[in-house]
Image (spheres, helix red, strand yellow):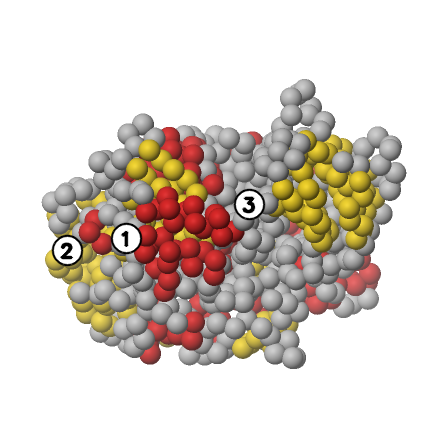
Amino acid sequence: MTTEKNLALGAADLARLTAGGSMWTTAAIPAAGIPSLRLSDGPMGIASPRVDERDVARLTPCAVSLGASFDAALVERIGTLVGSEAVRNGVDLVLAPNVNLARSPLAGRAFEYFSEDPLLVGCLGAAWVRGVQSGGTGAVPKHLVCNDSETDRDRVDVRVEERTLREVYLLPFELCADAGASAMLTAYNRVNGSWCSEQTHVTTIVKMEWGFKGPLISDWFGTHSTEGSLNGGLDLEMPGPGRFLGDKVSDAVDAGIVSQDRLANAAERVANLARAFGGEKRAVTIEDADALLVEAAAAGMVLLRNASSLLPLSPDIRRLAIIGPNASAPCYQGGTFAKIAVAPGTATPLEAVITRFGATCEVVHEPGVDPTPRLPTMPVTSVHPSDGSALPGMTVEYFASTDVEAAPVMREVRATNSLTWFKGVHEAVNFDAPATVRATGWFEAGQAGDYTFYVGATGAVRLRVRGQLLLDHDAKLTPGDVMGVLKSGESESVSLSLQAGERVLVEIIFNHKPARAHGLWFGIRSPDNGDAMRARAIAAARDADAVVLVLGESSDASVESKDRPDTRIDPAQTALAADILAANPNTVIIVNVGHAFDASFARDANALLVAWYPGEGFGRALAEVLSGDREPAGRLPVTLAASENDYPALSLKPAADGSLVYNDGVLVGYRGLMAQGTSALHAFGSGIGYTRFSLLEARVDGSSVIVTLRNDGNRPGHEVVQLYRSTPEPALVGFAKIALDAGETGDIRVAIEPRMMRTWQDGWVSIPGPIQIAIGRASDDLPLSVQFQNHK
């Protein structure tokens, strides 16, 4: 270590810096000017540590939605917003962006990935880093590397060839490093036999070849040994106190299995990080967050079909039917430990559409199918409101023992149907000892009938309604299943007959034992009949001038810790779509998902719009897109294949020995389809907006291509110009977004990323030229081309 203060540090202090100080903080050495850093999970906002559900963070669009924007400047602005939220919450480092790849459409965490394309992921991830760090908060890209799936993520061994590793999966991290990322978070999995927290080969690339100066940090509980971690290049073990690093490193140094130089280098990286990001934050001008989140949500919406210009909706419509479960129960984000509490009063799509259209036409709504097929909501009001008025949600109380008659350690109101905790997430609560959580709320029956009450947990759980013990369940789930809460047998349910207007007290008591993670989930399903719901929806569609059908997922459909079995959305919803299309062809289908999906059910729809998981701006953005106040300006960041068998990578199940072979190599996603000559149902990069463009000509200018295009429509709009190389396989090498008024002609300069003009052959080699660069609006719509002479 080089500074005078660092030279004064003894071996014990050096060792102490290599492990966290607590669940969400690093160790401090005040005498050496090394402050403790406070960390938070991301990337959809500042997720933890939170003390109270009412202290909510702003919920940004998920990465797949931001990826669909193809707009680095917009993503940087979102990063700046998250950075300002970090400053407001006293957070020094944010564990984000997630720059893994949506290699397979089944990836459970695909909503956190920008794209299946490494260049798009890297460019947008770098933009997010710049935005967050503009206010002095550090961004920590994750998960290094090949954590592109969730099945057995803490034991899977990804087998990937060197060229693919460097050109595809490390490229986004390299671009983030170039953007000045503060640190990097290592993955749980193994790569080519070695744990990512002990990956000497990857560490050498990152630290030696790229010259990255920040520390490599373990994902929470993702370490396996003292020697392997430090000698493999890990610098900081989280959380603290360390299981393998920290105080335990001194013995390893004394025994000669870890060198003093390696310890000093790790401590220096952590110390430099603390000094850089642990002080005063810079003042950053923050724009209107509400407007930005609506803008970003709309910018990621992808219009794939618009026959007869059904969208934007005609102002002459007199009766508009809003049908589908996600109109009133939208999915703003996926299921993750970094889940953000949605702010009270956030407008649902249904509410926003009624506000926008209700003054000029009659708006009717029918869900058509159960809005919560896996886990129903918990529509209750709190029991112990702190301000004297009942709040939406369960009152959650934490007890230091199993005695719930004692005073709780902490009390909060949580407006949710599932709770997850890492041990120690709540600083006032000790999750390392047997203790109790009690959740209570008042439920009022809207109609007479049999109501079904659900409850599940990672420990013993009891359910009482009206003081009557209805369930007493002590089965324990494995920690890896905390986020995927509703596989068969993972919850218990019981029915209870209630009268219309009857008000009952629901009480759930959860006794937990020490574990890495804890989960508790609950819900109430009303007695409404599914056939009756569907019949009402069909009748509403038949009587309407136009229909907006909002389909999709609930937040437990795409989850951290579990991959999906297939690409289909709920069969009951696709059956509903067929009925609605038959009843009224003037139907706009909105798909609210976080990943590539089977879109074949909408082949004959007049209009198809993919909304992704668009964050808290969803409702307003959708209403403004439907009305034409905004354009759906997104393009597909992932391929929607015609058949699951067309995806170059699909199954994510490791072999019996734990290996998962990346046998698609560099032909990930659309690259594989293009190389095979396979047509997608909707290709990577496609989307049509509300106007049409002609690409007129293109010419090479240095390391860029200048493209001339014209807006041939009668509305202003956006176009995304995309450049694809032809050799040694198809690949995106540059992109840029332009806005033109109706009838306007303009030029756009699209930079060619120099890293895309090389290939790995036991060393970096320039692709020999001239190289044909195809230019167009999507990977299957490339009307122009130029010859590019690559330079070494």
Please state if 410 lies on the left or on the right of 269 as rendered: right
Give the residue type at disc 2.
Ser
Residue under numbered circle 3: 528
Give the residue type at disc 3.
Asp
- Front residue of this view, candidates 447 and 416: 447
Please state if 262 lies on the left or on the right of 325 as rendered: right
Q: Residues within 10 Å of mark 1 (few under 14, many from 20)?
A: some
Residue under numbered circle 2: 694
- Front residue of this view, candidates 160 and 653: 653
Rendered image: mark on residue 585 = 1
Percent coordinates x, y for residue 580 in the rendering: 36, 53
Please state if 353 lies on the left or on the right of 464 as rendered: left
Seen as rendered, the residue at the extreme top is 388
SS of the residue under disc 2: strand
Q: Nearer the viewer, mark 1 or mark 2?
A: 1
* Residue at screen point 24% across, 59% down: 777
- Give me the C-alpha separation between circle 1 and circle 2: 29 Å
Rendered image: mark on residue 100 = none
- Of pointers 1 and 2, the one earlier in the residue sequence: 1
Residue 167 sits above or below residue 631 on the image: below
Q: Residues within 10 Å of mark 2 (few under 14, many from 20)?
A: some
Q: Residues within 10 Å of mark 3 (few under 14, many from 20)?
A: some
* Residue at screen point 23% across, 35% down: 315
Query: Which corner quadrant holds the C terminus?
Result: bottom left
